Amino acid sequence: MKESDVKNRIAGANRIVAVALGLVLTLAQASAARGAEIKVLCSTALRPVMQELLPQFERATGNTVVIEYGVSTAFERRVEGGEPFDAIFLTVKQLDALVQAGKIVPATRTAIARSGMGIEIRAGAARPDIKTVDALKSTLLAAKSIAFAREGAAGLYFIPLAKRLGIEEKLKLKGTTNGDEVGEAVASGAAELGILPVSEILPVKGVELLGEFPRDVQDYAVSVGGVSVAAKQAGAARELIKFLTTPAAVLVIGKKGMEPAR
């Protein structure tokens, strides 16, 4: 065999090895990207949507989502204190504050869904009238106690509304830490009425949605997502936010008592 043929074969073999190594590295990188573990902080209002959509996202991407639910104001304080995360979903005011503080990549700010505010009662209880503002005031004043999450979206909405209606001092308010405690208080009879976003009322056992607040005083808990400037899995976090705006996700959002954010 000629020396030139040997050199050609060696060169060819080296090219094959190089291509193979490149393919292995590419596959490894792809596997790593698809196997990312995404740390997510999420306000309770979006929990029903997330519980249905996250398994779909994980199956479609191979990523794993480690999520914690809570009230927006508490998460805002924790992030300001330096807590690490990849993606976060909060109410508008809290997330925008984190954007301004340099904690969230501004270009990743994405509105996901919104839920109107509602009132819950114990299952089977009498259903007082809240169809008009005057009827609402009468029902609130007649209630033996009203539960709401102090730092949740409902608390941020309800206390200013009570002041606006001039009835704050007359209400028998029962502040709680989070929406779960509101549902428990109403289901157990410890509170007669509960104030929450509709999306948080519908999944709770032992309670019923009395109705949404009248249109003249209604407001919405808008869930907005963003990616941390220090995210370890920034690409996967962006992919998650994009997934939550797909047509399939919009169908789930509607089913959970919410609507796409405008």
Image (cartoon, helix red, strand yellow):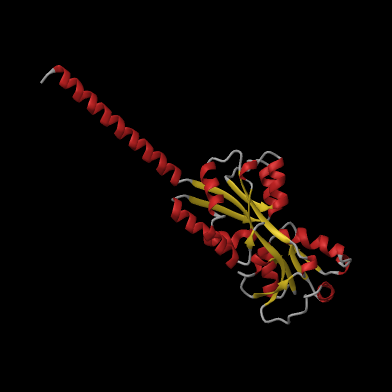
Q: Is residue 53 visible?
A: yes
Residue 142 image offset from top left, x and y in percent: 83, 76
On screen, residue 128 above or below 243: below
Relative to 186, is 62 on the left or the right? left
In the figure, residue 198 lies in which quadrant?
bottom right
Residue 189: quarter of image: bottom right
Residue at 48% x, 58% y: name it: 56
Q: Is residue 51 above or below residue 121?
A: above
- Residue at the image position 58 percent from the left and 67 percent from the top: 255
Q: Nearer the viewer, residue 99 or 84?
A: 99
**What number of labels is visible?**
0
- Identify the image quadrant of the N terminus: top left
In the displayed orientation, state which residue is furthest to the top: 3
Image coordinates of residue 140 in percent, x first then y, are 81, 72
Residue 177 appears in view: no
Decide which of 260, 148 is in the foreground and name it. 260
Q: Residue at x 71, y 49 (%)?
A: 94
Q: Nearer the viewer, residue 187 or 142?
A: 142
Rendered location of residue 191, percent (x, y): 74, 72
Residue found at the far left of this picture: 1
Who's the residue at 54% across and 56% down the image? Answer: 246
Q: Position of residue 21 (x, y in %)?
A: 32, 33
Quadrant the C terminus occupies? bottom right
